[in-house]
Image: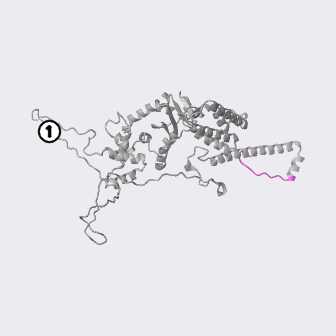
């Protein structure tokens, strides 16, 4: 029988008797061939069981127990369409807002009363008893504003040489677009993620301007070029910071998988695309090699190469423990999950936003007991006689990580400025993934670098609670590249 291929076998009593009559050697050959067939079938069944288990694990993964995004979750969450009883969710009371009158309207139109609406008596000379004010807020008609600069040219009567007037800085062409139009094009394309053709339509419909695709692309490239000094400033700020968040995600550049890296904190964002995912990219970015604070990241091993303190994202860990408990029936995983969430709750409620002393000793005792339970339920795999080390499996690798890296996992418990998770880095990457969903792919690496510079600038502006459009206008002002500022 060919390996991996099942074949039906049939034998009659008469054939068995004929083999028996041929003597012991014929019987031995028949039995041995049947044993080989049975063993082959057992190997095929075991292989099929492994494949089925992998497929079941893949189907059971969702945003709760893995790194899959919520958009990939199935709308049919419950088996057999049976609705689970859910406790009623208490809705948060939100304070409503309404349009309020302004104290200094731009225009006041008086509605006079000249005649009585009842008896038609003349009221033009009657004093006003009260004023009823009503305001309408609207956008005035939008029209592009063109400023013409007329430079004088004079000839000196003494030396007969010509002197030309000096134009304001930045006015260099016979006809050009101003910084606000540049900023609007960048704002629409890189912040609101409006496609190129629709951006052209918007400029035509709202501003009566006919911009070409090349013009808008050139405006974006010019903005990215202006931000070169800003990126160097952000890099140095992050190197000197006490805490940074690091993460990476795959991006599609002309059909080829590349990687988008981020480094940031609550004030700054630095995005950088690269062909590689690991330390080659980190070295070229140039932040981690010189950073000496706490780097918060997931369990990607190349981060540990760098000489700084590390803290692991517990949101990733919670999802892995959830999967181990719900799909792999690991009871210890539920206990560890509850312990980590309990630590987070206690840290959040404490005044110092950290725990120490007897509280941490008690927690570490519980932590050690759960780790021991995990090792007991998942003993090391036995040697199979094949080359190489036997596979430990995902569960045992998870237990060893919890055991060997407890300091990095629980750093948020002892150091008050270290957050529980790495969500800040994931939020910094999210809009790039949204852009990729809209466009499908990036055309080349240069365009990706331009987009990442602009997104880094916009994200930094938002973190510092400044106006994005005003900041984009300022990025086109002369001297910004050499002396960058948020506003």
Query: Residue furthest toward the bottom?
Result: 119
State whether residue 148 is above or below residue 119: above
State whether residue 119 is above or below residue 445: below
State whether residue 208 is above or below residue 26: below
The answer to which of 404 and 109 lies nearer the viewer is 109
Question: Which quadrant, please, contains the C terminus?
Answer: top left
Image coordinates for residue 309, horizontal then vertical, percent: 55, 29
Q: Is residue 106 left or right of residue 468?
A: left
Q: How is the image coloured?
A: one colour
- Asked whether 167 falls inside the magenta stretch, the response is no
Q: Is residue 251 left or right of residue 50?
A: left
Q: Please tell me in which quadrant of the rendered image residue 42 appears.
A: top right
At mark 1, the secondary structure is strand
Picture residue at 66% right of the left edge, 36% below the top? 399
Image coordinates for residue 264, horizontal then vertical, percent: 48, 36
Q: Which residues are magenta?
A: 1-13
Residue 286 in view, yes or no: no
Q: Is residue 299 left or right of residue 388?
A: left
The answer to which of 410 and 49 lies nearer the viewer is 410
Residue 470 in view, yes or no: yes
Number of residue marks? 1
Image coordinates for residue 380, horizontal then vertical, percent: 71, 34
Image coordinates for residue 150, horizontal then vertical, percent: 20, 44
The rendered magenta stretch, by its main secondary structure, is classed as loop
What residue did someone put label 1 on?
A: 154
The answer to which of 9 and 354 lies nearer the viewer is 354
Q: Please tell me in which quadrant of the rendered image residue 405 appears.
A: top right
- Asked whether 3 falls inside the magenta stretch, the response is yes
Label 1: how many residues lie within 10 Å, few (<14), some (14-19) or many (20+)? few
């Amino acid at each position: 029988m060919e390996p991996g291929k099942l074949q039906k076998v049939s034998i009659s009593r008469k054939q068995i008797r004929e083999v028996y009559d041929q003597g012991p050697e014929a019987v031995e050959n028949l039995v041995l061939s049947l044993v080989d067939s049975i063993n082959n079938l057992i190997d095929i069944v075991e292989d099929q069981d492994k494949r089925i288990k992998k497929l079941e694990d893949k189907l059971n993964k969702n945003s709760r127990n893995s790194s899959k995004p919520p958009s990939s979750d199935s709308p049919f969450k419950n088996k057999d369409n049976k609705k689970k009883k859910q406790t009623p969710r208490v809705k948060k009371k939100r304070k409503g807002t309404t349009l309020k009158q302004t104290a200094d309207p731009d225009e006041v139109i008086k509605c006079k009363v000249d005649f009585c609406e009842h008896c038609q008596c003349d009221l033009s000379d009657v004093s006003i008893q009260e004023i009823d004010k009503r305001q309408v807020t609207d956008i005035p008609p939008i029209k592009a504003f063109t400023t013409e600069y007329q430079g004088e040219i004079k000839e000196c009567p003494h030396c007969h040489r010509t002197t030309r007037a000096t134009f304001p800085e930045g006015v260099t062409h016979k006809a050009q677009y101003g910084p606000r139009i540049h900023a609007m094009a960048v704002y629409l394309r890189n912040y609101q993620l409006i496609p190129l053709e629709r951006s052209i339509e918007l400029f035509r419909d709202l501003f009566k301007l006919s911009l070409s695709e090349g013009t808008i692309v050139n405006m974006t490239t010019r903005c990215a070029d202006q931000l070169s000094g800003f990126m160097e400033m952000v890099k140095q700020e992050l190197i000197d910071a006490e805490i940074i968040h690091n993460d990476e995600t795959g991006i599609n550049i002309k059909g080829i998988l590349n990687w988008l890296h981020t480094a940031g904190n609550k004030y700054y964002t630095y995005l950088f695309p690269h062909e590689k995912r690991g330390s080659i990219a980190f070295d070229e970015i140039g932040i981690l090699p010189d950073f000496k604070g706490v780097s918060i990241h997931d369990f990607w091993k190349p981060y540990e190469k760098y000489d700084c303190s590390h803290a692991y994202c517990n949101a990733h860990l919670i999802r892995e423990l959830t999967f181990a408990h719900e799909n792999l029936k690991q009871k210890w995983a539920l206990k560890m999950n509850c312990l980590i969430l309990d630590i987070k709750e206690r840290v959040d409620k404490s005044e110092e936003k950290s725990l120490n002393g007897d509280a941490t000793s008690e927690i570490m005792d519980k932590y050690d007991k759960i780790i021991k339970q995990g090792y007991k339920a998942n003993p090391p795999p036995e040697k199979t006689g094949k080359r190489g080390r036997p596979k430990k499996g995902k569960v045992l690798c998870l237990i060893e990580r919890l055991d060997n890296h407890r300091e990095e996992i629980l750093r948020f418990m002892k150091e008050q400025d270290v957050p529980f998770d790495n969500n800040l880095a994931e939020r910094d990457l999210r809009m790039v993934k949204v852009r990729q969903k809209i466009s499908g792919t990036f055309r080349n690496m240069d365009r990706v670098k331009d987009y990442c510079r602009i997104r880094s600038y916009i994200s930094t502006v938002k973190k510092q609670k400044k106006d994005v459009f005003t900041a984009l206008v300022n990025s086109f002002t002369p001297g910004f590249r050499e002396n960058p500022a948020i506003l």
